[in-house]
Amino acid sequence: MPSLDEFGRIRLWTAGRQTADFLTRSGVELGIGDDAAIVSGCGAEREWLVTADTMIEQVHFLDETMGEADVGFKALAANVSDIAAMGGEPKFALVSVCVPPAWDAQRMRRLYDGLYECAERYGVAVIGGDTTSAPQHLVVSVTLIGTVEAGRAIRRSGAKPGQSVFLTGPTGLSAAGLHALRRIAAAEGAERAALTDWLSPRLAQAHRRPVPSVKAGRILALTGWGASLNDVSDGVASEAWEIAEASGVRLLLKEKLLPLSGELSAYASGNGLDAADLALFGGEDYVLLGTVDKSREAQLRERFRPEGIPLFVIGEVEEGPPGVEWEAADTGLRKPLAKQGYNHFAEGAM
C-alpha cells in the first residue's frame, strides 16, 4: 500500500463506517471533514460545535522553545481556533493529560495555569477530562464544545467562483518564531545572548501564545458574509487546498497580495529564509483563511476595523478542477501551489 498522509489515513480509518442516515438520525449536521462537527440538540435557535486537538511533547512542543504555561495555553487555543473557524463561540472544555515522570506536580500546575488563562480569555468553562500516566512524553488532549446560531456555521465547502480569498492577519510568524527559538536553544554563551537580543518578541509570542480569531469568525457568521472558512493551523497552502477540495473549485493566490509582516521579512532576510515560504507553508498562526463575495469586501473591512481586525484579500476563486495556484509577482506566471504544510504522516514529518 502506498504511503498515506494524515488525511488519507483518516479516510481509511473512518470512511463508510456509519451511514449518512444513522448520522442524521443521531443529530449530526456535519461530521468528519471540517474544523469542527456540527450537532443539533442545542435548542431550536443554536447548534453545538464539537472539536478535539492533541499536543504531544517532541511532536508539537519542545522544552527549549516553550514554557509549561505556554503549552497549556496553546493546547486550548488550538481548539478555540477550530470553533472560531466555524463562526462559533467556545463554551466547554474537557482536558485529558498523559503525564510522564519528568512532569512533576509543579510543572503540571504551571501548564494548567496557562490553560486556565486561555480559558478565562475566551470564556471557556473547563468541566472535566481524564488523567493517566505516560512512559516518556507528555500528551495533552482537549475536547472543546461551542455553539453557533442554527444554520450560521461556516464550512470549508462554501467557496464559489468569483469570490475573493482573504486572510484575517499575516502568517508565517509562528514558524519564524519556532525557527528562532530553536536556534537560540542550540547556541551557547555570547552567541545565544546575541540571538536572544535580536529575536523579535512578536515572533516568539506568535509561536508560544497564538491568538485565535474568535471575533472575526463571529462577525463572518452573524453577517452571513463568510462563504467558506478555515483556520491557519497547518499553513496557508494546506488550508487553501482543503477549501478548494471541499468546495470543488480552484483558488488562485497572488504573491503581490500576500501580507508579510516587517518582523517576518527582517528575520527571513537575515537568516537565509524565504518569507513567502514561511507565510505559505508555516502553521499555527490561527488567523482565518476564507472566501467572501467581492461585493461584500468593503463592508466586511468596515465591520472588522473597529475590532482591530485586518482584512487582506490575497486571491480569488475560479472554476476548474479543485486545486490551488500561485501567481508570481514579477512575471504574473501561474503555477500549482504545493499541497504543503505540517502533516503528521507526510514523508519526513516525523
Image (spheres, rainbow, N blue to C red):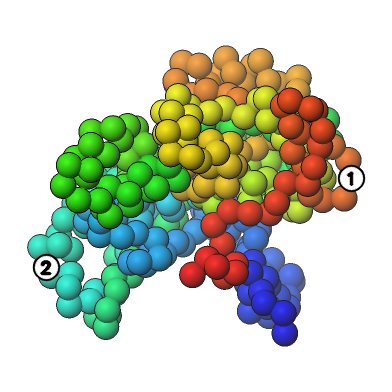
Q: Residue at x 67, y 25 (%)?
A: 256
Relative image position of residue 248 (x, y in whole percent): 82, 50
Find out whether the residues at labels 2 and 1 contact each other: C-beta distance under 8 Å. Answer: no
Q: Is residue 238 left or right of residue 287?
A: right
Disc 2 target residue: 105
Q: Is residue 64 left or right of residue 277?
A: left
Q: Picture quarter containing residue 141? A: bottom left
Q: Residue at x 60, y 25 (%)?
A: 312
Q: Which comes before the other along the chain, label 2 or label 1?
A: 2
Density class for disc 2 (Cα within 10 Å; few <14, some 14-19, many ≥20) is few
In terms of secondary structure, where does tag 2 sit? helix
Q: Nearer the viewer, residue 204 or 219?
A: 204
In terms of secondary structure, where does tag 1 sit? loop
Q: Nearer the viewer, residue 42 or 107?
A: 107
Density class for disc 1 (Cα within 10 Å; few <14, some 14-19, many ≥20) is few
Q: For the view shown, which residue lies furthest in the front direction?
A: 190
Relative image position of residue 216 (x, y in whole percent): 51, 31
